[in-house]
Image: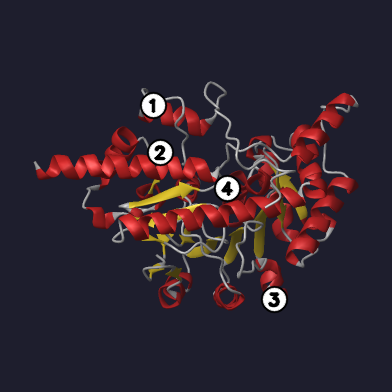
Amino acid sequence: MNEQKYDYNTMINRTKTGSVKWDEMKEWNPNVPQEVYPFSVADSDLRLAPEIIEGLQEFITNDLSLGYTHADEAYTSAVQNWMTKHHNFTPKAEWIVQTPGVVPAINFAIRALTREGDGIVIMPPVYYPFYDTIKHAKRHITESPLINQGTHYEIDFEHLEHKLKQPQNTMLVLCSPHNPVGRVWTREELEKIAELCIRYDVYLVSDEIHSDLILPGHKHTVMATISKEIEQQVVVCTAASKTFNIAGQCVSNIIIPNKEMRERFIAEKESYGIKTVSALGLATTKIAYERAGGWLDGFLELVVENHRVIKEFFAQNYPEVKVFDLEGTYLQWIDMRALGFGVSELEEFLNQEALDFFDQGYIFGPSGEGFERINLAASTESIRQMLDRFKEAMEQYQYQSQR
């Protein structure tokens, strides 16, 4: 890890900055000490890549406009070049549509391509905004749960086909790589998904926001590259936000090869009055894609190390706790059911006794009850401190239980 150039050790205290993650932690426990960091919401408290800071300073210093801005040829080329280099996929310029985020894009796709009352298929445990987005669009949530194999999850293709063949289910929203279980779907798995969507004429929205965060030994495949047939049936959601910790800039690049689908998507987006996105967000994304690739390399090494530290800790101290393999994302999925806590008791124990703030598994669907999602986009030292607090609180809890 190139620590001379990049700082993966310094954590930023974001108290009173409007940080969603930090404000939530204070709500959960107003008395949390200042030195405690949250490991919940999927953004990072590490320093930004210096190339991004320098690029933004240049942008502001040069007095470039912060007026209404669209994605020009230079911006589009930066996106295309990144996708080509990292994913062997070069989307045509006209395929790329900007939105204020991936979740809004999923909302636009659902509303543009399906009708009220249609079923939208998801594979839980899964990213929790999928549920609200479907519900708010007045569509039906149709679940095809993943299969928990103990160390990893797999798709239940028989059950998935059963759901997709039902005519009322008109769209599948796929998380690829999968949040929260950390799977990077193989090409063979994606081919099966694509084949089912084609066979039953189901739209496919592929949330690929974590696609740059792939751990060694695994490879992400953009769904649009699976076949020419699925290319004309898919909406691919991408962004630099998770990759470079710039989610607050609110820019995503949505790739829609099918012209009719794209026109319907844009019309839906513009019906909300959204024609442009943030000028600073466009600049930040372009800078990140063009300059900050080296930072990402070191960041992925950090994620690998943090995964190793957590897996080793639980294997040595609490072997009954299952730490799932991590193939992609920086989100660690852990099964804590064997500790014997009820769902609310586990949350209370973590937030009030251990002072460890994770995303509770139940928010990802009922199959996540008793699980925790831990954000690994943090310094290894802060991860170790979090684990130390967990161990100390567990020892105290076990002592009290035996009295």
Image marks 2 and 3: residues in contact by CB distance under 8 Å = no
Between marks 3 and 4 in the image, the one whose residue lies nearer the viewer: 3
Q: The disc labelled 4 sits on which kind of residue?
A: Asn
Determine the image quadrant of residue 279: top right
User: Can residue 363 be seen at all in this image of the molecule?
Assistant: yes
Above or below residue 278? Residue 368 is below
> Nearer the N terminus, badge 1 or badge 3?
1
Proximity of marks 4 and 1: CB atoms separated by less than 8 Å: no
User: Dot 2: few (<14), some (14–19), or many (≥20) neighbours within 10 Å?
Assistant: many
Q: Amino acid at mark 3?
A: Ser
Residue under circle 4?
107
Callout 1–callout 2 Cβ contact below 8 Å: yes
Q: Secondary structure at mark 2?
A: loop
- Judged by depth in the image, the label closer to the viewer, 4 or 1, is 1
Judge from the rendering whether residue 256 lies leftward or rightward of residue 173; answer left or right: right
**At 26% from the left edge and 47% from the top edge, which residue is drawn?**
343
Marks 1 and 3: CB-CB under 8 Å?
no
Which sits earlier in the primary sequence, circle 2 or circle 3?
A: 3
Q: Are marks 2 and 4 in contact (CB under 8 Å)?
A: no
Q: Position of residue 85 (x, y in %)?
A: 79, 62
Q: Which residue is mark 3?
A: 227
Task: Determine the residue positioned at 54% across, 29% down.
Answer: 19
Identify the residue at the far top of this view.
16
CA separation in Å, label 3 and label 4:
25 Å
- Numbered disc in front, either 1 or 3: 1
